[in-house]
Image (cartoon, rainbow, N blue to C red):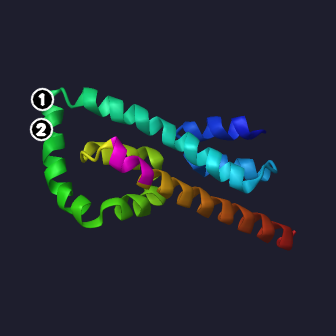
């Protein structure tokens, strides 16, 4: 496994949940794995933003999205970028990217907090992977 495999895995719906541990177990530099997995996980978000605009053209969906935007607008105003950063490690890049696009946050305002959240997620996963490897070596 090399860094290209880590990148390709991170683009899939498996996201960083698989790409970070696989890259670390393969012996790739953890900082490189974290950065490549975060970037690979962020790329589909651009596709989601383009798809959301196309989906909003349907009247039924657009009415639903308007109501969702009204309900979530106060939370977006209250928590802003910090909310995106904290939610991303839990939900993942795909779900958070779709949510950010659905509630009407522009790509310009949403991409940096989403990327920071992905870096946080990948760092946590790398730490958990190293902890698991250390625990396994201690037990065996």
Are the two marked residues, 2 and 1, in contact with CB atoms closer than 8 angstroms?
yes
Q: Position of residue 81 (x, y in %)?
A: 35, 60
Q: Position of residue 30 (x, y in %)?
A: 72, 55
Whether residue 8 appears in this view of the structure is yes
Question: Which disc number belongs to residue 18?
Answer: none
Q: Residue furthest front?
A: 108
In magenta stretch: residue 39: no
Report helix, strand or loop for mark 2.
helix
Q: Residue furthest bottom?
A: 138
Q: Residue at x 30, y 44 (%)?
A: 106
Q: CA distance from mark 2 to mark 1?
A: 6 Å
* Residue 65 found in image quarter: top left
Q: Which contiguous range is marked in magenta? A: 107-112
Q: Nearest the camera: 49 or 12? A: 49
Q: Position of residue 138 (x, y in %)?
A: 84, 73
Q: Position of residue 75 (x, y in %)?
A: 23, 62
Whether residue 18 appears in this view of the structure is no
Q: Residue at x 59, y 56 (%)?
A: 122
Q: Main secondary structure of the magenta part?
A: helix
Is 24 left or right of 100, judged from the image as shown? right
Residue named by callout 1: 59
Residue named by callout 2: 63
Tell me: residue 140, above or below residue 5. Answer: below
Q: Residue at x 42, y 64 (%)?
A: 86
Is 121 left or right of 46, judged from the image as shown? right
In magenta stretch: residue 111: yes
What quarter of the picture does the C terminus occupy?
bottom right
* Residue 91 found in image quarter: bottom left
Q: Residue at x 24, y 66 (%)?
A: 78
* Residue 15 found in image quarter: top right
């Amino acid at each position: 496994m090399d860094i290209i495999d880590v990148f390709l895995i991170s683009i899939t719906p498996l996201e960083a949940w698989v790409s970070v541990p696989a890259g670390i177990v393969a012996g790739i530099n953890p900082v490189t794995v974290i950065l490549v997995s975060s970037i690979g996980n962020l790329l589909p978000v651009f596709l989601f933003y383009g798809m959301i605009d196309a989906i909003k053209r349907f009247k039924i969906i657009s009415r639903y999205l308007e109501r969702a935007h009204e309900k979530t607008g106060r939370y977006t105003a209250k928590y802003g970028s910090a909310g995106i950063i904290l939610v991303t490690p839990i939900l993942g890049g795909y779900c958070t990217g779709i949510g950010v696009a659905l509630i009407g946050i522009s790509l310009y305002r949403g991409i940096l907090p989403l990327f920071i959240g992905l870096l946080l997620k990948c760092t946590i996963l790398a730490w958990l992977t190293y902890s698991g490897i250390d625990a396994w070596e201690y037990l065996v």
